[in-house]
Amino acid sequence: VLELDQPVDSSASNINSETVKLEYCSRLDGLCGSSAADWVDLPHDVVLQSNCVNGGASVGFMNPFGPANARPWWEDVLAEVEAGRTVLFGAIAEGDIAGTAQLVPATKPTQPHRADVSKLLVHTKARGHGIGAALMRADVGVAGRGGLRLLDLHRAPAPVAERLYPRLGWE
């Protein structure tokens, strides 16, 4: 859980902005970025997710996991983005999607201040370069600008996650 009591600067990051570009797309009021059509590449997203799951990422999928499993899931994510129920973030490196993350605002009328941070995926070849941290900072920054003040993150124990999330202020 991360409670935001002040605006967050999502621009701070240790990634090289000349080689990695962060994008996001959403139809949520007040959370404007680029159109998913500008940067989402379904075949690359499918490869990214398959790589992460098969590389041990605990993101709610089981092995064996391949493109046949990932494609329908990504199609559902993109439909949620188009419907305004999800914000999708992407890190593009050398023309390919190196990582993604999602922000899913609560739908209950009693929780307009809350959202889930979901499915942080960074390709195994792109890890260790600050992409995960940059995606999380972007997630938090957009949430703060959109008035979301309570963010939930559910994760399973994993060495990479156990280093990343506490360093970024997550409990």
Image: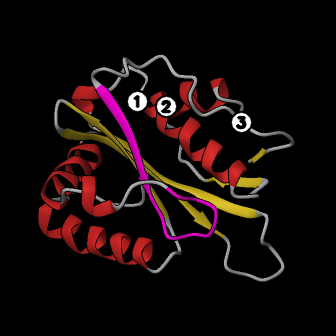
Amino acid type at image mark 2: Ala
Q: Which residues are magenta?
A: 20-32
Residue drawn at x 73%, y 81% as measured from the top left: 108
The mark that comes first in sequence, 3 or 2, is 3
Query: Where does residue 117 sit, x and y in percent of width and height?
Result: 58, 54
Amino acid type at image mark 1: Ile
Neighbor class of circle 1 (other Cα within 10 Å; few <14, some 14-19, many 20+) is many
Indicate the quadrant where residue 103 lies.
Answer: bottom right
The mark that comes first in sequence, 1 or 3, is 3
Q: Is residue 165 above or below residue 116?
A: above
Gap in Å between the C-alphas at discs 3 and 2?
Answer: 13 Å
> Which residue is disc 1 drawn over?
131
Q: Is residue 53 visible?
A: yes
Say whether marks 2 and 1 touch (CB < 8 Å): yes
Amino acid type at image mark 3: Val
Q: Which mark is residue 47?
A: none
> Which residue is disc 3 drawn over?
8
Element under disc 1: helix
Q: Is residue 58 visible?
A: no
> Which residue is disc 2 drawn over?
134
Gap in Å between the C-alphas at discs 2 and 1?
Answer: 5 Å
Instruction: Judge left or right: residue 40 versus residue 86.
Output: left
